[in-house]
Amino acid sequence: MTGYVVGIDLGTSNTVAVIRSPDGRRRPVLFDGAPLMPSAVFLQDNGQLAVGRDAQRLAQLDPGRYEPNPKRRIDETTVLLGNTEVPTREMLASVLWAAAVGVAEITRTPPPVVLTYPASWAHTRRSLLQEAATLAGWRQVSLVPEPVAAARYFISTLNHPLPLGAAMVVYDFGGGTVDIAVVRHSPDGFTVVGAGGLQDIGGLDIDATLVEHVGAHLRRSDPAVWQRLQAPVTAQDRRDRRLFWEDVRGAKEMLSRTAAAPISVPGIEAALHLTRDELEALVEPMLRQTIAETSRVVASCRLAPNQLTGIMLVGGSSRVPLVARMLHRALGVVPTVLEQPELPVAEGAVVHPAELTGTSATGTASVAGQLPRQTSPGVAYQTQGYPAQQLTGQSGVVYGTQPTSAPPVSPASPHSPVSPVSPVSPADAPVSAVPVSGLPVSGIPVSGMPVSGPPVSAPPVHTAGAPATAPVLPHVPARPAKRRRLALVAAAVVALLLVAGGAAWYLTRPSWETLPKVPTALDGTSIGIEGAGAAFFHGKLYVIGGYTADPPRKWLNTVWIFDPASNTWSPGPGLDFGTSQMAVVVTPTDQLYIIGGYTETGATENTYQLNAAAGRWDEKTSLPEARLAGAAVHDGTTVIFAGGVGSDGQPKDTIWALKSDGQSWEELPARLAQPRAKLTAATDGAGTAWFIGGSGGGHTYDDIDVLVQRKPGNPRKLPQPREGASAVNLAGFGLCVLGGNNGDKVYQWWCAKDGVASRLPKLAVPRAGMAVATAGKTVYAVGGYSTAKKFNGSTDAERFTTGS
């Protein structure tokens, strides 16, 4: 095959997109760091629909303009958001448009797309999905039933045999519904021979049951708190309600791995605890209904349970362990449980026929009375204004199915303009993060020393960063004819801007400014470095120590100071010894520390404070043990140091806090999820600290350990493992991670907030081991190495200032 193909599973709660590359690899598209994009939409004041996490955040402002589950409204022509009736087609189109933007950053031009749909959907629903895809700018669209896509994944990726004539069950427990289907391997491919499901049971209903269970406790113990969460009045109440529901959902997911999980309740100091036994007792009545429906669908196909080749669990809610146990007890077949049950449907949609030994290219759905005239879900529709066409470097057909014309899609009905197009200017970004303190937090310096082993797998595709040609944007007609002409012109202009420059916001987003090269040597010459420390202190950038790139490689004891006013470097107070891979911290009381590090004698436990008035470094309280390539921050109360390599050469998971008297360190009960070094750290300056990535024991990690008031918080994951990265907490942007590598792969930005990474400029040469510091809205990056470009250090010094 040639060219890219995209599979999209537009779900009730989340949307997933998987790209199949020309070389056959299949990878999920990451929407700002996560493979799941919330399917939610929010109608903004400018008439545009915000999508995903942006929509979830904006919902706090006016819940009446928020629709968390557009797919559930598929049978309604319009949905009232605020005071505006928005066509359901446009809500779905906005979600598919957001997916298209993420895909286009990788593929540059819109590739063919395969959309999945529930097997029970009849022609009207499928047509609406097709129209939404066309409205979103997808030019070549084909449809495949979700269970057929899951069956393809079952065979191609899991290597489960499904002999000719054999049948399997696909049990799809999603956010809004439970869909059951029996798929048979027929000579023509895969056929849905039976389908059913429950429209009133899904993961959202489990969440609601758990909320009510916790609420019953709160009604007795804290009735005022429960009343505020149940019937929020103020904006803060609504934010707390959202946080509460999110924490309940997180506890539910945690209970798939552990026996108990905490639930934080806004307004109550101590966390409540939910056990797996409680969860299973609460959800068992719902699950019994789904098991009975599964048995009914199997029986309707005139199959006995022992005639089934397998049961595949998909959908995020299938993680609940009781689901697999009850299915096994009822049908006698051990279900296939997946680590990421949200991904198989989208991935199966782009499985190539060559991977399905003895099968044809597509599947069919043939449920009597439900899918009239549907003989092949692999048909590529042609729609008026967007004919199917061969794109450069791409095949004109999708996996052997010939593009077949369908009746033209009728133009959108007139209504108030609601565009599925996301804002194209940074000024239109939906929300900013709560401003954080101006405390400069340096990126943790790291080195190219061989701590990690080679990458164990290819990372997922990451969409954040580079500008790209987005799909052609459709025009959504306005009510009056004059406004329609104006909107057409505006849409054409926007499309031209997208094609010419990737996106209008890209033309105005900040860019890296090249600074004079770091002298690094006392004689003023420039030697490439990595593993230096950096801090913005007293209005100037300090670059401390480092490890030289050119042989004979050595540790530097120099300190160079960059003055932004004069745009020049000058020497600062030098160290008595050469060092790299130290942690650098600036405190709110204007103290600059370097902690631990890598010297000629190995790891050191020494801590030094800059005495700027005297022009020297004073030795302070040493770490309890020697550490190199650890990470440290001041969390607003004290200095926290984590990880690093000890004097024995082994990575550590210990976390220390400097006591209030500043005379000693204490070991915290919390530990890193993995013993590791070459991690990075950041803080909000208000009690929360993040320790991110790193490597150890031949592995590179994607862990984000969170401390809240020096106690463990809810951990997160990076989209890909990386060591030698630099973390910053930017006002208005939140937590972001720059650079880092995993083997020969070197990365750009990742940000915790949806939509932020793509607003930040890419480094011309992405690097790891940089010295990074922030000064308000300005980020400085100095030195670093690149495993991809094969250089050990750099003299590059760059900065950019955010525009919002």
Image (cartoon, rainbow, N blue to C red):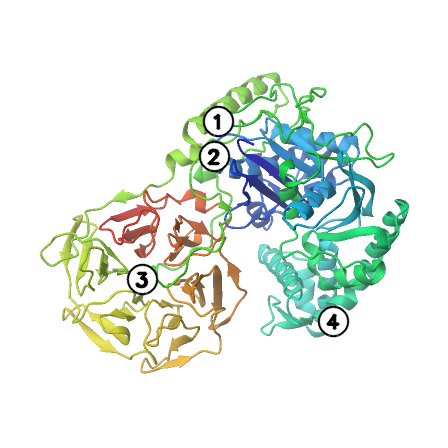
Mark 3 Cα within 10 Å, few/some/many (few <14, many 20+)?
few
For badge 4, the amino acid type reads Asp
Q: Nearer the viewer, residue 291 or 73?
A: 291
Crowd band around label 1 with a 10 angstrom C-alpha radius: few (<14), some (14–19), many (20+) = some
Instruction: Please tell me whether mark 3 sits on a helix, a strand or a loop.
Output: loop
Q: Position of residue 404 (x, y in %)?
A: 69, 22
Position of residue 41 measured from the top left corner of the image (x, y, whole percent): 62, 42
Distance (Cα) linking label 1 and label 2:
8 Å
What is the CA distance from the residue labelled 2 to the residue labelled 3? 42 Å
Image location of residue 743, percent across then percent down = 40, 54
Q: Disc 4 and disc 3: Cα gap in Å? A: 47 Å
| Dot 4 or dot 1, earlier in sequence | 4
The mark closer to the camera, 3 or 1, is 3
CB-based contact (under 8 Å), mark 4 and mark 1: no
Residue marked by disc 2: 424
| Nearer to the camera, 158 or 143 | 158
Q: Is residue 166 left or right of residue 722?
A: right
Q: Say if residue 44 shows up in the picture.
A: no
Disc assigned to residue 494: 1
Q: Residues within 10 Å of mark 4 (few under 14, many from 20)?
A: few
Instruction: Check the image and report above or below for 321 versus 417.
Output: below
Image quarter of residue 499: top left
The residue under label 3 is which amino acid type?
A: Met
Q: Which residue is mark 4?
A: 277
Q: Amino acid at mark 2?
A: Val
Q: Quadrant of the C terminus?
A: top left
Residue that label 3 marks: 449
> Which part of the image, by quadrant, shows the N terminus?
top right
